[in-house]
Image (tube, helix red, strand yellow):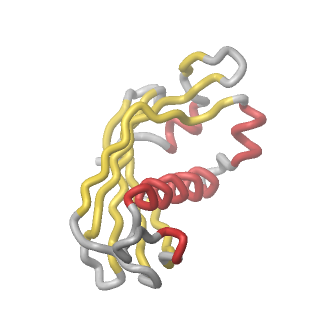
Amino acid sequence: MPHSQEYTVRWAELDPNGHMRHSAYADFAADQRVHWLASAGFDVRKFAELRLGPILFREETKYLKEIHGGEKIKVEGRVTGGMPDGARWTIEHSIYKADGRLAATVTVDGAWLDLDRRKLTVPPADLAQAMAVEG
């Protein structure tokens, strides 16, 4: 990483107060991770072939600025921690308003699950390399 994805906030992502609902922040962060992994060669089909899937242990959101419907946002993700073998990782997502102001951060801690054994596992070397902590 870092990898970024741009979005426009839709009506369905708003709460009754007219700003982006809390769970939409997590949804945008998850979508950004999926796009980033696909761009690194690990799309849904590749994970199915590997019988491997990401799981989360922790997700924390810090809200800094309101985001409203119709706003354009940019979600950037980068690996900020993890094990050398890539088995566990931390990704921090920064969600920016169109004017560049930081609106929120979403931090997740996760690992890889062997879908057949239902146990945590070490990913293939190329995935571990893609998930390496950035300097």
Q: How many marks?
A: 0
Q: Place residue 77 in its image quadrant.
A: bottom left
* Quadrant showing the N terminus: bottom left
Q: Is residue 10 above or below residue 57?
A: below
> Is residue 64 found left or right of 30 in the rendered image?
left
Q: Place residue 51 in its image quadrant.
A: top right
- The picture places residue 28, in percent across and down from the top left corner, at 48, 61
Q: Residue furthest front?
A: 16
- The residue under the point 54% across, 70% down is 12
Q: Nearer the viewer, residue 66 or 40?
A: 66
Q: Nearer the viewer, residue 17 or 50?
A: 17
> Is residue 110 found left or right of 92 in the rendered image?
right
- The picture places residue 9, in percent across and down from the top left corner, at 48, 76
Q: Is residue 6 above or below residue 94?
A: below
Q: Residue furthest left?
A: 64
- The residue under the point 58% across, 53% down is 34
- The picture places residue 101, in percent across and down from the top left corner, at 25, 76
Q: Is residue 120 above or below residue 37?
A: above
- The residue under the point 58% across, 38% down is 126
- The picture places residue 92, in percent across and down from the top left corner, at 34, 50
Q: Nearer the viewer, residue 96 or 128?
A: 96
- The residue under the point 58% across, 16% down is 119
